[in-house]
Image (cartoon, helix red, strand yellow):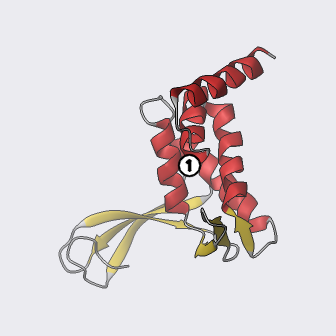
Amino acid sequence: MRCPFCAFDDSQVKDSRPTEDSTSIRRRRQCSSCGARFTTFERVQLREVTIVKSGTLGEERREAFDRSKLEHSVSLACRKRGVTQERIDQLISGIQRQVETAGEPEIPSAKIGELVMDGLKQIDSVAYIRFASVYRDFSEARDFEEFASTVQEAAKD
């Protein structure tokens, strides 16, 4: 593993342990050259999955599934909401498992967006609305009001 501080190619594992949700291994490493310590995470990847993104003119783009992009989007939606990083990691791991075990080599980005919205709906209604505002491309305050009222109605049921 390359050192993030000096870019030396060799480091030693000093400690390994599973994460809280047992979906990855946390490793503490020490660089053999500069002695700096850093943490890495090792996760199981069942298969390569390609995400199919739809463009504005109907064209499609394809790119490899990237957990970090998903994690960034969910973290932004949950920012300052009191949602723990552990809960975000559990949501992301669950979505990643669903995507990898779906058996399809390609998955539409819309499907992943719906999985994220379903997960956020269970965790935090404000994070759910924040994510939906970007995902569904809200353009006016009225869009927020209408969506928020549907969330409130669903919460009453």
Residue nearer the viewer, 135 or 156: 135
Residue furthest out toward the bottom: 9
**Quadrant of res 61:** bottom right
From this viewpoint, which residue is outermost toward the left? 34
Measured as percent of width and height from the top left, residue 114 is found at 71, 48
Q: Residue at x 67, y 67 (%)?
A: 58
- Placement of 98 over or under 14, stated as above or below: above
Along the line of sight, which residue is nearer the eye, 84 or 119? 119
- The residue lying at 68 percent from left, 52 percent from top is 94
* Horizontal arrangement in the rendering, residue 156 relative to residue 78 (left or right): right
Q: Amino acid at mark 1?
A: Asp
Q: Position of residue 133 (x, y in %)?
A: 56, 38
Q: Quadrant of the N terminus?
A: bottom left
Residue 47, position as x, y percentages in the image: 70, 76
Under circle 1, the secondary element is helix
**Whether residue 90 is visible:** no
Horizontal side of 109 relative to 40 (left or right) equals right
In the image, farthest residue toward the front: 57
Q: Residues within 10 Å of mark 1 (few under 14, many from 20)?
A: some
Name the residue that disc number 1 marks.
Answer: 89
Query: How many numbered circles does the render carry?
Result: 1
Residue 127 occupies which quadrant of the picture? top right
Whether residue 136 is situated above or below residue 16 in the rendered picture: above
Quadrant location of the C terminus?
A: top right
Residue plotted at (69% across, 18% down): 152
Q: Residue at x 66, y 61 (%)?
A: 109
Q: Can see residue 133? A: yes
Q: Position of residue 122 (x, y in %)?
A: 69, 33
